[in-house]
Image (tube, rainbow, N blue to C red):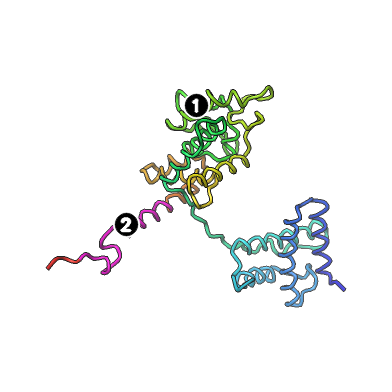
Amino acid sequence: MPDALATQIQRYLDHLTVERGLAENTIAAYRRDLGRYAAFLRRRGVLDARRADEAAVAAFVADLSSSTHGEGRPYRATSVVRALSSVSSFHRFLLREGDAARDPAAAVVRPRLPRPLPRPLLVDDVLALLAAPPEDTLAGLRDRAVLETLYGGGLRVSELVGLDVDDVDLDEGSVRVLGKGSKERDVPLGTYATDAIAAYLRRARPALATRSTRGELFLNQRGGRLTRQSVSRLLSTYARRAGITKRVTPHTLRHSFATHLLEGGADVRVVQELLGHASVSTTQVYTLVTKEHLREVYYTAHPRARGSSARRREPA
């Protein structure tokens, strides 16, 4: 016979399925997280979620953080954070429904996630990628303009697909971008990106446009606005064609844009403005990448960087 805890969790899962209409995979993730939480509470003799306190929730987070799964692999910090989010959402549901007087997860500190460093492409890989689209097809002309614009301006893919023809100033070599929070910024594009857009506008876009086409800059084969998914697919195609084995996304080009600027001596606050970051702290993660690169070059090239084994012997 199910205890109160099992009944409460099932009610919450039914709520997620019926009232919120979440996808099956999402429901399955909630079920796994809450199943682990319920098993932990039962080991502590807690059979009703209303009896769980802040100490119990915090202990569950600590227990999961130190546990292993599968072949002895520890849970990643992202998995622990997701589990705490599921538990918090579950207790908030009980509180909203009037089945509990408090939310014991509200004050539990969320584990800190390690901040992953961006993984930019090498300059040579970027050049190979930009040269991959053919110049003798409509799609190739469009795709070269897309790639040059992503890298030349450091645009987010959502910003790129939202561009209209009127946003581009070929004389100035710049583009007006609508970024996060509906904030506009003017971004210089450089000669290669400007030339690629000009070639696309002259030789490809008129043939792709239809009667229903309006001001959209980058068009698909049906004359509509190019989608983010389409940009991701074409980027993967050209990365393979360029011989790049690592996964390449539109954001990879944005990372590469920022990293290559900083490596070239650009001020971090200038890069912040170009990327449209609200805070310079967001941009500073790219300085960590360039420092890592500098260290790699130093330890590879300097004769006294790695101790006695790297010392050159003087002739007798």
User: Residues under labels 2 and 1: Cα distance?
Assistant: 42 Å
The answer to whether residue 92 of the structure is visible from this angle is yes
- 80 or 252: nearer the viewer: 252
Q: Quadrant of residue 216?
A: top right
| Dot 1 crowding, Cα within 10 Å, few <14, some 14–19, many 20+ | some
Q: Position of residue 23 (x, y in %)?
A: 75, 52
Residue ID for mark 1: 199
- The residue sitting at 45% across, 49% down in the picture is 286
The answer to whether residue 273 of the structure is visible from this angle is no
Q: What residue type is disc 2 on?
A: Tyr
- The residue sitting at 66% across, 62% down in the picture is 107
**267 left or right of 169?**
left
Please check the rendered image and state whether residue 125 is part of the magenta-colored stretch, yes or no: no
Q: Quadrant of residue 93?
A: bottom right
Q: Quadrant of the C terminus?
A: bottom left
Name the mark nearer the viewer: 2 or 1: 1
Q: Position of residue 281 (x, y in %)?
A: 48, 49
**170 left or right of 25?**
left
- 91 or 241: nearer the viewer: 241
Q: Position of residue 275 (x, y in %)?
A: 49, 40
- The residue sitting at 66% across, 60% down in the picture is 82
Residue sticking out furthest to the front = 136
Which of the labelled discs sits on residue 85, or is there none? none
Residue ID for mark 2: 298
Chain part drawn in magenta: 289-312
Q: Position of residue 88 (x, y in %)?
A: 71, 60
Q: Quadrant of residue 228?
A: top right
Question: With respect to residue 100, does 276 lie above or below?
Answer: above
